[in-house]
Amino acid sequence: MFVDKVRIVVKAGDGGNGAIAFLREKYRPFGGPAGGDGGKGGDVILKASSRKTTLYDLKLQGYFKAKRGENGSGKNKAGKSAEDLIIQVPVGTIVIDDIKKEQLADLDKDGASVLVAKGGKGGKGNARFATSTNRAPRFAQKGEKGELRVLILELKSIAHVGLVGVPNAGKSSLLKALTNANPEIAPYPFSTKEPNLGTLLGESIKITIADIPGLIEGADKGKGLGHKFLRHIERCKILLHVIDFSHGEPKRALSELKLIRDQMAAYKKELLEKPHFVVLNKIDLIQNKNQIKEAIDYFEIKTFAVSCLTLEGIDKLKRELIKFFEEDGSKHLL
Ligand SMILES: Nc1nc2c(ncn2[C@@H]2O[C@H](COP(=O)(O)OP(=O)(O)OP(=O)(O)O)[C@@H](O)[C@H]2O)c(=O)[nH]1
Ligand SMILES: [Mg+2]
């Protein structure tokens, strides 16, 4: 199950209490105060791991608590500090403090971490309070409370390539043709309800591709499903506009492209600045192959004609994607 937003509560460990104790040795009946300090409570830390892909298990658990520090004890023995609680989250998780409504972190790299709740300090034992006027203090400090925080975790997928288009254009089919993914494909709109991810392997690079639910006019006003998923493609390096070209009419394809780009702009203008290709799909249904060539010339941006059914044109598109990322630098190297 694809869970991309969860609310969790985290509680750091309380500090251990300081001890009240006195030395009682055979030959030193009044050996003085000897209560040790309490140990520190465990911190709660979120850490991004590329092995995790969903927030589902966090949703199930909901509440995360680190251990408290041990209490101090006699003979000046300090209590042990508790271990930190490290919660693994997928790379691309954004951490928001739900009470203050502020972003705490953007864990966009494998291994990136953030301390979300600080463990309480241990209390001081009575040995620390001895003075020249009070040599045998009968009090010690309690440990501090560990922090409690309510967090929203949001997963912005960090696919390299995003597939966008109207419902039924063949986005899931294209994901399947390009990658190892096996998404649901169906002859009716809105078959994809949650984003799917797949990987395309080049010789030296691994490209992640995401397919999101179809976009329709008015999506920015809540129509359809696609709009709330646009954030999944916010971080993509390149977008592929998938268009059902079975009708063979370049003008119609262009107006569909415009519709999608308008929806993207309504979500966030910056999305329009991303590099993008047009992919004209379902060309197996076109009799007159000249129409395909004409359409490719008609678009001013780089355009590919493919069939996810016969796989015509798919290898070329794969090659171009791999080339794009190789030229983009080595960030995606395996
Ligand atoms: N003939 C032909 N049919 C295709 C091709 N690609 C996809 N289809 C069909 O088009 C329909 C829609 O395909 P999907 O891949 O589910 O489309 P989608 O864009 O993911 O649709 P939503 O998730 O509902 O937005 C399915 O019946 C596919 O079999 C193609 O290249 N040729
Ligand atoms: Mg789909």
Image: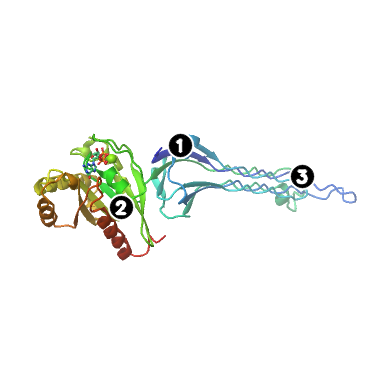
> What type is the residue that disc 3 sits on?
Ala
Residue 132 marker:
none
Q: Amino acid at mark 1?
A: Lys
Task: Describe residue 125's horizontal placement relative to residue 185 as left or right.
Answer: right
In the image, residue 168 sits, relative to residue 113, either above or below, namely above
Residue situated furthest right in the rendering:
27
Q: Please state which of residues 239 and 151 is positioned toward the viewer in this rendering.
A: 239
Which residue lies under the disc numbered 1?
A: 59
Q: Which residue is mark 2?
A: 161
Residue occupying the point 67% across, 44% down: 70
Looking at the rendering, the quadrant in which ligand 1 lies is top left
Tags 3 and 1 touching, CB below 8 Å: no
**Position in image of residue 137 (x %, y %):** 74, 46
222 versus 318 height, above or below: above
Disc 2/disc 3 C-alpha distance (Å): 65 Å
Q: Position of residue 323 (x, y in %)?
A: 29, 62
